Amino acid sequence: MKEEKGFVKEITPQSEDFSRWYIDVIRKADLMDYTPVRGCIVFKPDGYELWERIQAGLDRRFKETGHRNAYFPMLIPESFFQKEKEHVEGFNPELPWVTEAGGEKLEEKLALRPTSETIIGHMYAQWIQSYRDLPVLINQWANVFRWEKRTLPFLRTSEFLWQEGHTAHATEEEAREETMRMLEVYREFVETEMAIPLYVGQKTPSEKFAGAVETYSIEAMMKDGKALQAGTSHYLGQNFAKGFEIKFLDRDNQLKYVHTTSWGVSTRLIGALIMVHGDDRGLALPPRLAPVQVIMIPVGPPKFRDKVMARFDPLFDGLKAAGVRVKSDLREETPGWKFNEWEMRGVPIRVEIGPRDVDNNQCILVRRDTGEKIPVPLDEAVQRIRALLEEIQRNMFEKAKAFRDAHSHLHINTLEELKGHIVRCEESGELAGFVLAGWCGSDECEAKVKEETKFTSRVIPFDPPQQKQTCIHCGGEAKHTLWFARAY
Amino acid sequence: MKEEKGFVKEITPQSEDFSRWYIDVIRKADLMDYTPVRGCIVFKPDGYELWERIQAGLDRRFKETGHRNAYFPMLIPESFFQKEKEHVEGFNPELPWVTEAGGEKLEEKLALRPTSETIIGHMYAQWIQSYRDLPVLINQWANVFRWEKRTLPFLRTSEFLWQEGHTAHATEEEAREETMRMLEVYREFVETEMAIPLYVGQKTPSEKFAGAVETYSIEAMMKDGKALQAGTSHYLGQNFAKGFEIKFLDRDNQLKYVHTTSWGVSTRLIGALIMVHGDDRGLALPPRLAPVQVIMIPVGPPKFRDKVMARFDPLFDGLKAAGVRVKSDLREETPGWKFNEWEMRGVPIRVEIGPRDVDNNQCILVRRDTGEKIPVPLDEAVQRIRALLEEIQRNMFEKAKAFRDAHSHLHINTLEELKGHIVRCEESGELAGFVLAGWCGSDECEAKVKEETKFTSRVIPFDPPQQKQTCIHCGGEAKHTLWFARAY
């Protein structure tokens, strides 16, 4: 083991200091490291492998829905940002700029992409001439840059990794369908593979993407009750089409602007995974995403090692053959030390075999999600383990959903009630969580809630648990019912 | 079809102008596009898919040899480049610099990585303390930047995509083994999957990587007889370990510097693929790498379409079920137009079925590599196609190897002979190709050859077809036998 991991002797309990807990866990589990480059981290192999698994799951889904990958230049000329007014206002303050290259000062400075609507819009204008060229369905896996003031590993860093889909369509209807299709791809992937329950819906105008007509998002609740926006899908209307002159000759022989969409998720999903499932013992990874699903550890005195290994090895081989991602830990450490180590790393199932287990023709399965110990006959072990992985996946989702629902508050109707709720939570140590509230639709009312409570509007859910009648701030008629929460 | 492809009406023949042929092919096959960002291209879906297949093949091999992926910051502080003298001299002239970010001028400017030895060296110094931490075997897939004066799509662009392996070892021996292991991984992949025959060996000191002790490379011959360096593996000795203080406490309780390696291939492999196999009809892709291995096209008058499709569809399904990457082209274009189109795109096998084929219970296979037409019984078609894909893969390699060998010249021993060879080739239109020559080992002699002939030293092959006795320039005793060629 590496010395530097020793710096995290014990993981701070979540209840004591959730932020400290988070940093302790990602450091101790060796997922990342800080670097001398402001706000940039290293994604270490154990952290990057989570991203590789997220990439594989999403990439397959993108291709199944007809998208293809491409790669566009990272450097974007300054003038490109001027072509969509909201876009430049939204991103300008966060851009790093290349001003010199090859020993010379550049005539026009180049931004490191914060997102690629502009350069892609420019290229689409060359590629799209006729209705026969549509739709264009392209995705890009790339690094992006946003020079943030406050940074937090995986959640907000100066450089991060993401995918960005960019599509162009002949009609508004098709573009809106695409926006919803990809939102649903995200929901299905994050709920099914990452076992993270989501609130899904539309962003308010003040929270939408700079340049979008409408932004939709998936929002998850972390174990400190705060919200994390885990993915967004934007209907961009003709904003970028007009900025970049993306026009096509339609069937009716009319020259028209296309309708575009964009959608993205990033390495912040790694942060969501940790903060939704982790506990005081460390990471807890859902089986479908876990790089290691089963850790096998022999136990008992060394003199029985041969006897144990005679049953241990065939089970290991059997699991491998069954496609289970299994690893064995045969290092010269105590079993107790190894148990802690692999619990901390979040492996869903631990398998123990000792001499007495061999006598009883069994092994012991230990669930990371519940701690339960389950003796199973050796000749049923492969099949029981496979079933248990499914069960743990389901249980982790249900557990996270129960947690979220328990901290989703439906009975708050006024700003005073929200303030009272927050004060009560602070006093009792409860989590303030998500609050469902009515909203009249005015930016001012939304801003006031934020100003006075730090609760921001998260999403207008498609399927709210109830419809609110009055605005939480002004008391006027509610046009929308939405989730408010403190957010990352 | 998109209008802009129409710009390339016909592909310039290779014999007329190879450079023009190359640009025509990559444009017509829709692999890339130019951008307004100096020296940067778009990797369009058909081009990027070739990279995805290269990535998949290599990534699997890297993991099988014990490597794991990680991601390091793209921005590298200026001071990092100063820590290895040769490195800074080698890369400084090509760097783009970020000097402003988040609305402020940076105190220290940041380079866009041209390669990551420095930032990774800095991190390894934190991570490596003891012999127990070694070896560190990490790979990174990333974008990199080199502000080149002359650019050529896929071969030399300001931004390109690559992988860079970076490993650290306790001993020189282990590091040297790693250097050779990864060179062999490259050779095996490029020869086996890409069907590109290689000369493999060591670079001369003047051609080695800036900061390496020794550089090894794989070199391929393009169809214009020029060389392309297709991948490199570097033994870095303790150069970066000393620059970045990467030290470990060894078993003998001594504090020692590690020995490091690095190795990389890039999107220029796409260029190699095109220029080794392509011909006047367009791309020709080896079956193992081809995104589409088989294109199925129905032929004959429309009135027989139902009759044809009754046999066409089951064959399509059968190929899919057999794991063949098959596509059908049912567009309303003439068969002739489609034949040209898919030949141009390099698909290894075309399958035609018309009404008379149905009567004869057969289909026609057409090989992209030879043009041969092979009637096969429908009930044997799947198995015959699978076998033919293997055969085409082998034949493409053998054909490329025969071409390379025919243009590898062994009988030139003096600079005068080389000059004569070049003049003769220019006059006759023959390709000058690769020339095997002796070399005394002096930088001066090597430089003179380059100066007077534009032939550069490519590689000192491990296994030269003959050993040369005298230096091509000074006539003194040859220490090495090496391949010279004009190079991309």
Image (cartoon, coloured by chain):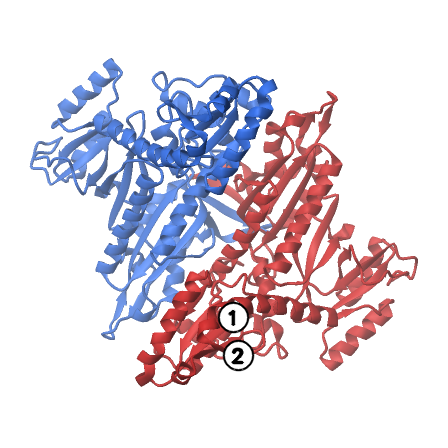
Chain colours: A red, B blue
The dot on residue A468 is: none
- Residue A160 visible: no
Q: Nearer the viewer, mark 2 or mark 1?
A: 1
At x 27%, y 52%, the residue is B181
Q: Amino acid at mark 1?
A: Arg
Q: Amino acid at mark 2?
A: Ile
Residue identifier under label 1: A384
Residue identifier under label 2: A374
Provide residue B291's location: percent of width, then percent of height: 46, 37
Chain hosting mark 2: A
Please tell me whether residue A114 is drawn above or below residue A393 in the rendered image.
Answer: above
Determine whether, in the image, residue B445 is placed left or right of residue B60.
Answer: left
CA–CA distance between discs 2 and 1?
10 Å
Badges 2 and 1: C-beta atoms under 8 Å apart?
yes
Name the secondary structure under disc 2. Answer: strand
Determine whether, in the image, residue A285 is placed left or right of residue A219.
Answer: left
Please tell me whether residue A378 is drawn above or below residue B90 in the rendered image.
Answer: below
Provide residue B358's location: percent of width, then percent of height: 50, 24
Q: How many marks?
A: 2
Please tell me whether residue B284 is drawn above or below residue B325 in the rendered image.
Answer: above
A53 or B268, which lies in front? Answer: A53
- Residue A406 visible: yes
Chain hosting mark 1: A
Determine whether, in the image, residue A359 is placed left or right of residue B398.
Answer: right
Q: Which quarter of the rendered picture does the N terminus of chain B lie within?
A: top right
Provide residue A186's location: percent of width, then percent of height: 64, 53
At x 18%, y 43%, the residue is B462
Provide residue B162's location: percent of width, then percent of height: 41, 45
